[in-house]
Image (spheres, rainbow, N blue to C red):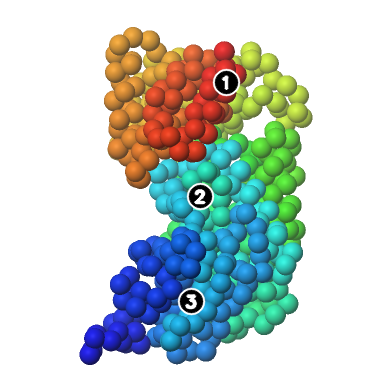
Amino acid sequence: MTGGAPQFGQRSEFYTFAPETLAQELPEFTIQREVGKGSMGIVYDAVRKQDNHRVALKVLPPSLTLTERALARFLREAELMEKVSHPAIVRALEHGKHGRLHYFVMEFVDGVTLEQRVKNGPLPARHAAEIGAQVARALHFAHERGIVHRDIKPGNLMLREDGSVVITDFGLARETGTGSLTESGAIVGTPIYMPPEQVLGERGGVGTKSDVYGLGATLYQLVTGSAPFQAETAQGVLKAVLEHDPQPASALQVDLPTALESVIHKAMEKEPARRYGTALELAEDLERFLRGDPVLAPRRSRLRRAVRVIARHKMIAVGTFLLVALTFAAWQLHLERGRWHLETQLAEAGSALLQAAMPYDEQRRPRSQEQRDQLARDAEALADEVLASSPKDERPYYLRARARQRLHDHKGALLDLEAFERLHGGTTVDLLYIKLFSLAGLEGERADARMQETVQLLIRLEQDERGPTACAERLVAIAEETEAGIERLRVLELARTLVTGEDLTAKALLGRIDAAIAAGK
């Protein structure tokens, strides 16, 4: 500062507006606090004085307006947002200029981003699918009006307090059929969630199917807790996006329904022609999954993935195959035979466990409880075989624990979960919820005390002020996806004791709990 006047154009002031300083420049608003930085500009929690309305105020620092391209992008974001009015898209209210400051005003979304939420662990499959269907329909709405977002990711999706989702940050959006404000060959977006055509910076190649890919990559992270591609550098991520398929989501989340995994991977196909044709098609397939109907996405298989990799890299694949075949064939055959058998057994155990959780088979014929119990016993037996030859592998303990939970052998399940913890090097939020379900199936003061200890630990681990309520929401989601039984009722009753507050969210959650308890009795 010099002479008492803010020198916003200086580099030292870039992205450093203090609320009281900004209030001098924009007297129409009461500035509360900075809440984040978008693709271009700073976002503040503010109150518009003319109507005392709480708003999100996005400001472009003057140091950025020195380039016409930056200013054009900022103004375009405001104009594009004003063209779409949808419950799941943040609403733009006005835009303007005061002195050297350009700004626009949006509705204030009270909630957390999905990026913040997934730090607590993966979302339940149904919850993720419900979010995905909402976002896909909102994207289709924008696409029909000629607008492509180009930066769909967990950080740009917010969960309101009522559980609904809203798309934010249109800083990289553009209209279809118009020239881009990006130089040809330049990369815009977030690498982890970008499709290959966006990584390559293809002019005209980035369209509505790019948003479909971004939503698929987002769903992958929501259900697994991990980004689809990871590397030490941005270049490493870009290379992985172009050359590799993501690890199957079910390899990271063994309870993930096969149908939802198929939907996610179809949305993330590297070739746009293999993805869903529109965001609406993606929304409808997610809704089929939620209804329990067969999805249109083809089921993925190991052979199918291998064929696709070879098709993308024919010369490299052939050369590598010959080199391996000629140099290491006999040695690899000897080593791989045992490893392949172990991995096959684990895969079969996981598949049996997933089938046991499904009331219908792949031909939509109902499975009897006896058939589902037998599938759980098959998974347990396969895990036993793996443990006999590989007792230090943590995965069979987890699979056997989940199989034993289905068979109501909760003492055995807890022993396996504790063994998994030891080999894994510690516990996780997800594992604590799974343990809590088995504790709910046991009787006695010791089990009750352990339940309370586990709940208190979960509340401490929930990373927001809604710890008890957040814990209750997760317990209800788990119970709703579980068959009726004493465990389910005890978990629901425990969740009821954790609900705090008298707001609409708490009342709605209590209603869900009471309805679930009534349905289970």
Q: Residue at x 68, y 53 (%)?
A: 137
Q: Is 435 displayed left or right of 402 in the figure?
A: left
Q: Mark 2 against mark 1, which lies toward the viewer?
A: 2
Quarter of the figure that contains the C terminus: top right
Question: What SS does tag 1 mark?
Answer: loop
Residue at screen point 30% across, 37% down = 460
Camera-nearest residue between 420 and 49: 49
In the rendered view, tell whether residue 413 sits above or below residue 181: above
Tell me whether the residue at label 1 lies in contact with that at label 3, contact meaning CB atoms closer than 8 angstroms.
no
- The quadrant of the picture occupied by the N terminus is bottom left
Amino acid of disc 2: Leu
Q: Residue 103 carries which label?
A: 3
Pick whichever of labels 1 and 3 is earlier in the sequence.
3
Gap between marks 1 and 3 measured at Cα: 52 Å
Q: Position of residue 450 (x, y in %)?
A: 30, 21
Of residues 122 and 20, the one nearer the viewer is 20
Seen at 57% across and 67% down, the residue is: 92
Query: What is the spatial separation of the Cα atoms under label 2 and label 3, in whole angstroms?
Result: 24 Å
Question: Closest to the observer: 277 or 55?
Answer: 55
- Residue type at the position of mark 3: Tyr
Residue 159: mark in rendering: 2
Q: Which residue type carries mark 1?
A: Glu
Can you identify the residue that label 1 sits on? Answer: 483
For this view, does 119 lie left or right of residue 307?
A: left
Label 3 crowding class (10 Å Cα cut-off): few <14, some 14-19, many 20+?
many
Does 361 sit above or below residue 90?
A: above
x%, y% of residue 386?
A: 46, 28
Q: Distance between the residues labelled 2 and 1?
A: 28 Å
Residue 373 in view of the camera: yes
- Looking at the image, tell me whether mark 2 or mark 3 is earlier in sequence order: 3
